[in-house]
Amino acid sequence: MDPANLATAIEQMTTARGASVKEMSMQQPVLLVFLRHFGCTFCREALKDLSNRKQAIDRYGGKLVLAHMSDQKTAEPYFNKYKLVGIDQVIDPVCRYYEAFGLTKGTARQLFGLQSWIRGFQAGVVDGHGVGLQQLGDGFQMPGVFVLIDGQIRNRFIHKLAGDRPEYVDLLAASCELP
């Protein structure tokens, strides 16, 4: 992760509504979640996890922002399905911000290794998130989670495997205090 490139990315990152992510982070902690493509079982699982934890995120004063590689028309039905209506989103079809935040392309082991298959079966079949086809975006792009406060990264979770399941609220809690 190049610090100058990261600083520029944070400075320039805006939501689909035109809001500055840096400015948001000056007002309240931003939980910035970089998703995989919407056809990915783990992306849908992450949306469900975030939906289930939205109230806890709000209790910490956090602002949830989702970054994805798709377009708004494709993303909205997924956000609606998981009751994340009106969530701010950063649309990054060329993965410029993913790269600036140090998120890499996955290796075969990270994406298709035995652990990913086991987790994929659990998330897709047992937990009902389904198995989908790749949608808009780079199917090799790895996800990640960042807590931004005052324009700076205060905490992060970089996925080692596509199926890693971050503790979103713990990441936020380690960076802020309950009011």
Image (cartoon, rainbow, N blue to C red):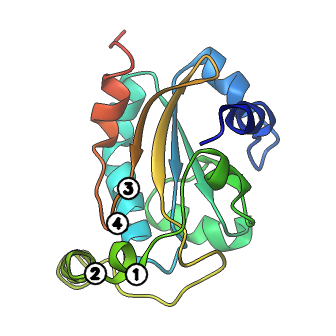
Q: At which x and y percent is residue 57? A: 38, 33
The crowd level at tag 1 (other Cα within 10 Å; few <14, some 14-19, many 20+) is few
Q: Of the residues under marks 3 and 1, which one precedes in the sequence? A: 1
| Marks 2 and 1, how far apart at CA | 7 Å
Residue corresponding to mark 2: 113
Residue corresponding to mark 1: 108
Q: Nearer the viewer, residue 138 or 53?
A: 138
Q: At which x and y percent is residue 1? A: 59, 42
| Marks 2 and 4, how far apart at CA | 18 Å
Residue corresponding to mark 4: 45
The crowd level at tag 2 (other Cα within 10 Å; few <14, some 14-19, many 20+) is few
| Marks 1 and 4, how far apart at CA | 21 Å
| Marks 4 and 3, how far apart at CA | 14 Å
Q: At which x and y percent is residue 149? A: 55, 20
Residue corresponding to mark 3: 159
Q: Label 2: state its secondary structure.
A: loop
